[in-house]
Image (spheres, grey):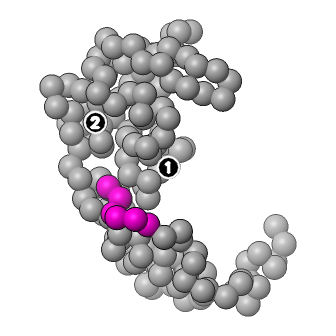
């Protein structure tokens, strides 16, 4: 990687537009809120403009979210739940449906507003959902619904 991408003086000015404006607040799980607060605390101890910019972005995010407890009413898929699905080829995938500021694809934390999450909301174990994907629609079966940590 070029050193230009790592030097503080190579960064464009911070004009307050680093995050798109929000209309209203976004949901976040208690665990996601705690992770962002911890990251902000860690950044406060680090020098440099990159850390300062991320800290400013985190402050804006934390001011624009509201904590929502995970919900799986009557075993249905809702915000903050962990849902396991089975594809037609028998492979299973587990997702956690979270707010937009805590998405982590490597950990399979997907936004509740994503097409996959939207297809799963309100489903229960045993239900079939149709997920719209770029390669085409696919039917999946909901195998399990759980609140993380339970």
Nearer to the camera, 20 or 139: 20
Circle 2 packing at 10 Å, graded few (<14), some (14-19), many (20+), is many
Could you tell me residue 98's position as x and y percent? 37, 47
Circle 1 packing at 10 Å, graded few (<14), some (14-19), many (20+), is few
Is residue 49 found left or right of 46 in the rendered image?
A: right
Could you tell me residue 53's position as x and y percent? 55, 81
Is residue 76 depicted above or below 37 in this figure? above
Identify the residue at image location x=39%, y=13%.
128
Q: Which mark is residue 30?
A: none
Is residue 125 depicted above or below 74 in this figure? above
Is residue 134 depicted above or below 14 in this figure? above
Label located before the other in sequence (2 or 1):
2
How many marks are shown on the rendered structure?
Answer: 2
Label 1 sits on residue: 104
What secondary structure do most residues of the magenta stretch adopt? Answer: loop
Could you tell me residue 44's position as x and y percent? 43, 84
Residue 41 picture quarter:
bottom left
Looking at the rendered structure, the secondary structure element under dot 1 is loop
Quarter of the image with the N terminus is bottom right
Is residue 103 found left or right of 27 in the rendered image?
A: right
Write down the region rendered in magenta: 22-27
Label 2 sits on residue: 78
Identify the residue at image location x=29%, y=17%.
125
Q: In the current view of this chain or complex, which residue is farthest to the right?
A: 2
**Residue 47 part of the magenta segment:** no
Residue contact between numbered discs 2 and 1, judged by CB atoms under 8 Å: no
Asked whether residue 141 is in view, the answer is yes
Asked whether residue 95 is in view, the answer is no
Nearer to the camera, 51 or 67: 67
Could you tell me residue 57's position as x and y percent? 48, 75
Is residue 78 found left or right of 128 in the rendered image?
A: left
Callout in the foreground (2, 1): 2
């Amino acid at each position: 990687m070029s050193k230009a991408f790592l030097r503080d003086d190579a960064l464009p000015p911070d004009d307050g537009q680093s995050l798109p404006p929000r209309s209203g607040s976004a949901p976040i799980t208690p665990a996601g809120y705690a992770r962002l607060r911890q990251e902000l605390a860690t950044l406060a101890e680090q020098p440099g403009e990159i850390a300062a910019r991320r800290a400013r972005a985190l402050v804006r995010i934390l001011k624009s979210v509201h904590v929502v407890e995970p919900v799986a009413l009557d075993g249905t898929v809702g915000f903050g739940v962990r849902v396991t699905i089975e594809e037609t080829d028998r492979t299973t995938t587990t997702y956690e449906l979270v707010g937009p500021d805590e998405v982590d694809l490597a950990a399979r934390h997907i936004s509740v507003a994503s097409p996959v999450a939207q297809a799963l909301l309100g489903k229960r174990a045993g239900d079939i959902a149709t997920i719209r994907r770029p390669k085409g629609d696919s039917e999946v079966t909901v195998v399990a619904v759980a609140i993380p940590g339970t």
